[in-house]
Structures are given as structure tokens and as C-alpha cells.
Image (tube, grey):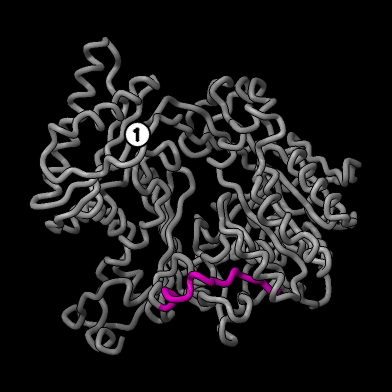
Amino acid sequence: MADDNVIRIGGASGYWGESDMAVPQFLRAGNLDYIVFDYLAEITMSIMARARNRNPDAGYATDFVSAALKPNLKEIARQGIKILSNAGGVNPVACGNAVRALVREAGLDLKVAVVTGDDLLPRAGELAQSGLKDMFDATPFPEPDRLASINAYLGAFPIAAALAADADIVITGRCVDSAVTLGACIHEFGWQPDDYDALARGSLAGHVLECGPQATGGNFTDWHLVADTLDTVGYPIAEIDGTGNFVTTKAAGTGGLVSIGTVGEQILYEIGDPQAYMLPDVVCDFSDVQLTEIGPDRVRVSGARGHGAPATYKICSTYEDGWRAGTNMFFYGEAAADKALNFAENTLKRARAKLRAANAADYSETLVELIGDESVYGDFKQSSGSRSVAVKIAAKHEDQRAAGLLLKEIAGHGLAAPPGLSGFSGGRAKPSPVLRLFSFTIPKPDVKIELTMDGKPIAFTPDTGKPFYSDNVKRPAPPDHPAHSSNELVPVPLIRLAWARSGDKGDKANIGVLPRDKTYAGWIWASLTEEAVADRFKHYLCGKVERFYMPGSGAINFVLDQVLGGGGVASLRNDPQGKGYSQILLQSEILIPQSLAEAI
């Protein structure tokens, strides 16, 4: 293990399309060792794959080159900051070539390393013959000619190997989001594959950084505390020591907020089972993580534990499964919601009548959503009687023309609609492919990882890991609360007791709930049972709900299965990634003593 020297890493990007304000902010603040960028999600890979099909030099995050590096490269070099990014997408070699061209143009002497091996699309035929099933719903492997992308989630040790070879910039394809941060830690502190706790803590630091300003006030439950400063929001910085524990902060003079609430929400984001958070380099246990405010905009994060790395890589593929089409229209005036529903129903009737006339199949799925009448709450909120609503009408079909027919009927129905219709400005929407996710695992030796530095190979021997069984995890005792009489209890909304953050993994959603005071955990646990959460989301939920307790912070994580209508681009819903699910849960009523209700 290394000594306790501290490295400072800035998290500059959480997705492809992220604002480019982070790098100049970091350079003005100075004193960073690394800047890391995360650009990739499952759907991003399929978009990049289609771009590469059109142009063999495309398929990577072009704004990493043009916006993040080009205007800032000389100052990055002057300050000696190393850059780590998965901007390579499905074409890391092309991304590396573009960055090298920038380096030459700037007259700099920076070494650029590229990690490849995650792209398994050339092996689609072989994988299709192997009998693989989806790891979540056991569906069979897609037909090879429908596949858009197949990528292994690589880890951090290849990045560390590139840094050990003296790379200044490391570009990868698909790796887990936290790997760019962990790779820097492994290199700086000399962590080995069996330094499980350190690897888990470095991964947690990467998890906090990977979504940029979500750790510094973005998507924060108490948004009103940062509302006037988000235009200058500070991107997160992790100060990581040799044990892997770290302090989350941001540059002085920037907007946003670093607090137990902002950092804690990000820790809970999309983690699934918090005691078996599976990564290629380590299986993390975040259940006993401690959060401590040690100063203004400074939160210390400690206590993550780790188990040995798994013996497999997770593989995510995307494949085309027909076409989708939809658009939003607006109604205002008396009975706006009723008018909108009538318009949607009649539009679908018209489109279906034309399908029947053409002897075409019906739509495989349709969706009508109202935005503005609170129907997102299901039975828990009655129609608000809003005089202004948006209506989303969408459908799926195997045939692109049939999907497009719905859009034609939406536009063509305008003069026969109820009064108050608006929203005709702009061009008509177009059908787009339905892209579904297929996830599976394969043994690590079946993935060949290669590293190059400016075109020359770098030696690298990956660790093969070992099987991990979550059934062997010892679960903590649930939180308790003081003895009470039921007639002393009163309901309060969860938002008075907790912060919350939600996100997605395929067709699963997670909602993490972090008590504002750890002593509230028992009361929240007692009211928010798995059955209560399932009932809260019964208008969306098709699967089960699992509940996990994290005694270190008192947090509770809920995982809801089959709740996103397919998730991602496979879903027709307005929120296919469950980003607003925490807002629904925060309206739930929690029974607490009258005295506590008065105190808070």
C-alpha cells in the first residue's frame, strides 16, 4: 500500500452532451492532478455505433476533442494535469488519433494512450451461437444482424498500466464509469488487486465524480438552497488519500453546494444492492459508508469495504427492435385534460383504421401520457383540474411506415380536435429505432484487452478474478426506533425527513433515501416497506421491489424491477430512466411521533 499522500481529481463530465464549463473552472482553480471524463451510457454506445457505420473515423465523443481539450490543452500541459476519459466510445483508436493531432497542432509533447478490447460486436455471430441468456429476464441472444453494439465493461487496471507507462492522456472505450478515477488511484498509490477496501473506496470516489455536478447541487432534493447559483455550479473534486477515503469539494467561488445531502444522494444513485455493487476490479460494500462535513463545501467520505473482483465481465449489447414514434401536443382552457385525452384516443383510432385498411398489424404498444394533471402519481393524486396540459402520444411498430403514420395522424387531426389545441410550431417528429438492452456476462479471459501508447503496445496482464455470491453477504439488522403508542403517531411527508435520488439500470429503477438525521431511519423503515413502495408505484410496476439498509448513513435503497416500460429508448414514457421517481416517493407519508413532527 502507498503512503497517505493526497491526489486531487476533478470530475468534468457525466454524459455525452455535458456542458463544457468544467475544464476552464478546474484550470482557474489550479492544483489538480487529474481531470476525468465520463461520456458513456448504454444508449450512447448504440448511437456511436451507428455513427461509426456511416463513417469509420466516427463513433467517439467529438466534444471531448473539440470543446474539452482543444481550447484548454496548452494550459492543461502547463499545469501538468493528466486526462483520463472514456470518450473513445466505440472507436477509441479514432479518438486517440484526433487527440494526437491536437497535440501536434499545439506543439506539445504529450503522450496519448488508448485502451481497446471492450468492443465485441465483431464476435456477434459467435456469441449468438453460445446459448447466452439475458442476465435479468433470460431472453435469448438477439439475432446478430439486429445488433447495434456489444461492449464489455472494462476496469481500472488498464488505465493504471497506461499511466505507469508515462501516459499524459488515456482514452478508453467502454469501461465502468468510476474506472477513470480508480485507475489514477491504483497508479498513484500502488494498489494491488487484493487491496479490496482501497479499491472499493477509490471506486466510490469515482462514483461520486462520474455524474459531474449531481454531487454539488444538481438534481438535489433541497434545490432551493442552490437555485440562484446553478448557473456557476462547481464541478466536484475528490481529494483521495492512500487508504482510498476522500473529501468531496469544489473550486472556491463556484456555485452549487457540497454537503452530506448532495454527496449522499450521489452515492445512492443507481447502486442496486449496496453490499454487492459489482465492478470489474472489486465488489463494493457501501453499507457502512460514513459522511462527515468537515468544513464549508467539504464532506469526508469513508468506510467503504470491498470483496475480490468477479471472474466475469458484464457485457451490454443494444439491438434494434422495430420503430417508435411520438410527439407532444398542448391543450389549454376548461377541461384541458379531458380534451387532451379525447384528442389522443381519436388520433389512435384514426391511425389504427388506416393500418387495418392496409392489412397491417396493430401497434405493439401505445402510450398516452398527460403532463400537468398529476397522473404521474397514479391513484395517489387526483386530477388537479389544470387548465393547461401537455399530451404525449406514442406507439411502437415493426414497420417504420406504420410508426410514421401515427405522426401524420397527430398532425392531421388538428382541425377536428377539441378546442384549445396548440403546439404546431416546428417540424414534424420522425420515427426512430427502438433500441433494447441485452446484458450478460462472460469469463474475463474471453475479453482481450490491448493498450497502446502513440501506436506502440504496452504490456498488460489482467487479473482473472473469482466468483462472487451475493447470497453469502451478511445483511445488517434493520434500524429500530423508540417504543411508542400507535395513537401518538402522525403522518408527515418523507421529504421532511429525508433526501432522495433515483435512476435506472435497464428496466430497473433504484430510489435511494438518505435520512436528514440518522435517528429518523427507523421511522422511515417502518413506513416504507417493500409493499408500501410497490403500492406507491403500482401504476408503473410490473416486477418486485427489494429494500436494502445502509447502517453507516441510515440510508435505504429500493430497487424496483420492470418499472420503466422497458427503459431507455425501448420505453415510450416521458421518464424512461426513472429520474423523477424519487420525487414521487418523497410525497409518501411517514408515521412519526407528534413530538418529533413538531421538532422538525
Q: Toward the viewer: 302 or 564?
A: 564
238 magenta-colored: yes
Q: Position of residue 484 (x, y in %)?
A: 25, 82
Q: Residue 118, relative to residue 522: is it above or below? A: above
Give the residue at x 54% y 26%: 141
Q: Residue 138, relative to residue 216: is it above or below? A: above
Q: Quadrant of residue 422?
A: top left
Give the residue at x 72% y 67%: 198
Q: Toward the viewer: 290 or 223?
A: 223
Q: Toward the viewer: 426 or 441?
A: 426
162 magenta-colored: no
Count of numbered circles on the image:
1
Q: Position of residue 235 (x, y in %)?
A: 59, 68
Under mark 1, the amino acid is: Arg
Work out which residue is located at the far left of the displayed protein and give it: 334
Q: Position of residue 173 (x, y in %)?
A: 70, 43
Which stretch did the figure color magenta?
A: 225-239
Query: Residue 310: in sight, yes or no?
Result: no
Left or right of 223: which side holds 462?
right
Left or right of 463: which side holds 410?
left
**Which residue is label 1 attached to?**
428
Give the residue at x 65% y 70%: 25
Give the residue at x 71% y 70%: 27
Q: Quadrant of residue 78?
A: bottom right
